[in-house]
Amino acid sequence: MNIIQQIAGLIPLFPLIGFIIIALLNKRLSRSLAGLIACGALLTSFVVAVIMFMNVPAEGTEVHIADWITAGSFKASFAFLIDPLSCLFLLIITGVGFLIHVYSVGYMHDDDNQNIFFAYLNLFIFFMLMLVMGSSYILMFVGWEGVGLCSYLLIGFWFKNKSYNDAAKKAFIMNRIGDLGFLLGMLLIFKTFGTTDYKTVFAQSNGFFSGNAVITTITLLLFVGAMGKSAQIPLYTWLPDAMAGPTPVSALIHAATMVTAGIYMVARSGVLYALAPTSMFVVGLTGAITLVFAATIALTQNDIKKVLAYSTVSQLGYMFLALGVGAFSSSVFHVMTHAFFKALLFLAAGSVIHGLGGEQDIRKMGGLRSKMPITWITFLIGTLAISGIPPFSGFFSKDDILAHAYATNKFFWFMGLIGAMMTAFYMFRLYFLVFTGGFRGGDKVHAHESPKVMTIPLVILAILSAIGGFVGIPEFLGGSNRLDKFLEPVFSASPIKMLSEMGGSSSVSEMSLMIVAVIAAVLFISWAYMKYDKNKELPLADNQKMPAVQSLLYHKYYVDEIYSAVITKPLDKISGFLESIVESRFIDSIVNKTGTFVNWAGGLLRQLQTGNVDFYIFVMVVGVVLMIFFKMM
């Protein structure tokens, strides 16, 4: 038995044990001890994941834990698939997750329910690990539903606030819509292949021709699930509302875990998507539209976490765009860099909120550079990374996606470039309004730097955001794109187009695209600087009249209002009708009359209970005579 067979099961086991201990001993554990257990569980899992990453074979290996389900011809094993793709996700989930856990020790220090918060965090990580480690779609679905449950618990953690509960329910319900697509796709996989095991499904899929209707249907259904979990149009509105949860939850959901589940599922199913060109185009088009759509909304938001939330939706669009053009490794590369800089940005935003006593409106910030120096410099690094400025991590992953998009579909490339320009603008708009100029929060607010338990994770994530892209340096810049080569065995069947297919020298072409993207980003950063730093412009107050386009963007295209008018209110009216007419007048009437009849019948039968022993003997004798009589007939 090799080392992977021996240690693979330990990675999800430690967070599960952490959850059980903290949940069972909730009231008996001190806050510091609960935090130590939760962080220790994640750190141990991360160490094991590193060891496994260093020993994983290129072709992968399956670790059988136990026989799980046997029903007729159907068999499902509780087994893990350990290959380069799952190992990379394990490092991201446990590594970034550990830093978020450490940060939470400081951020949630004064919360009375801190212990149960850490229990939820550990359980969330456990289910996410199950999702990426499972060797079959059915085991992935277990993790998929688990993270959905935990997201509900964490988003609505401050449950005394009704709006937070509404946000949690919204996330749960919208994810259930996507989950139905995943479930139907999984059932069709079983009907087609007789199993849900990855290796068997992918091996049998070689017998299908490109464009096969069944494979196309399967991949489209799976993508519906990915749209819900990874917040793509039209199932994206739950993600910005998920900001209701504590900031560490936002970082965990948006950066390293839940929203990347859809990316992982499509990437893991790359062999199937390679046989479904229609599905590939739908994935790419959805990603392209989502990334631009969400970016336009982020341009006008004034809540620091809402800007980052719509940024996440936009960045997820980039990842799906990459998947749609067959650049699976490029998409996973951006998942990794995005985990670094988006976790950093959310945690830095949480540090700002913590330092300002809970304030989230960027119109009431400003001048925090001198008051919160560590938060300032780390936030700036994260902003440079997400804006695609070299040599920060986002530059390399975003360039990789744009280069492959240009080689495959010029429209997708153009949408990606537009999205990159808007990303640079709204992120530096956020940066300048928060950290430069004078403080606009009033005399009663005294901004201060966060404690070390919160700033140390910021520093580590800032370093990763600065250097994380070096694993994917393209060959024409002197690199070898080691990440692409590491993932190549997993995506060998994917329809990735080489950059040389663009015509001419691939290095010259990619260099040109890279220069165009950087110049465009710098121009939009300069525009943001002129407006919000040099000219000191401020966003309009909520009660001020806005230009029509700005108002449309500020109100997020009124999508929530449209959903409410078209879906929610009609369903509420139908429910009200069913409750008042069908249930109250029909169902309740039947139940009540049944009870009335039973009472009436019981009253009649009760007359037989006279209490007279002679009468009871007489009835018994009559009964015996009748029995004998009917027996003799």
Image (cartoon, rainbow, N blue to C red):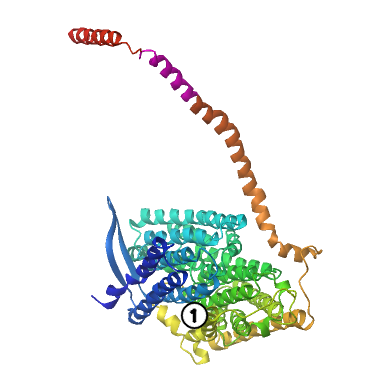
Query: Residue 499: where, in percent of width, then height?
Result: 52, 81
Neighbour tally class for label 1: few under 14, some 14-19, many 20 plus, Cα within 10 Å: few
Foreground residue among 183 and 50: 50
Assign a secondary structure to mark 1.
loop
The residue lying furthest to the right in this view is 545
Query: Can residue 492 be seen by looking at this rendering?
Result: no
In-image side of 268 versus 518 (left or right): left
Quadrant of the frame with the N terminus: bottom left
Residue 531, located in which quarter of the rendered image? Answer: bottom right
Residue 395, located in which quarter of the rendered image? Answer: bottom right
The residue lying furthest to the left in this view is 632
Q: Is residue 308 above or below residue 139?
A: below
Q: Which region is colored magenta?
A: 593-609
Q: Is residue 607 magenta?
A: yes
Residue tagged 1 = 498
Q: Is residue 385 above or below residue 206?
A: below
Q: Amino acid at mark 1?
A: Met
In-image side of 184 versus 540 (left or right): left
Foreground residue among 438 and 431: 438
The residue lying furthest to the bottom in this view is 478
Query: Chief secondary structure of the magenta span?
Result: helix
Residue drawn at (53%, 30%) of the image = 588
Residue drawn at (35%, 59%) of the image = 196
Query: Can residue 61 be seen by looking at this rendering?
Result: yes
In-image side of 286 versus 192 (left or right): right
Q: Is residue 579 above or below residue 458?
A: above
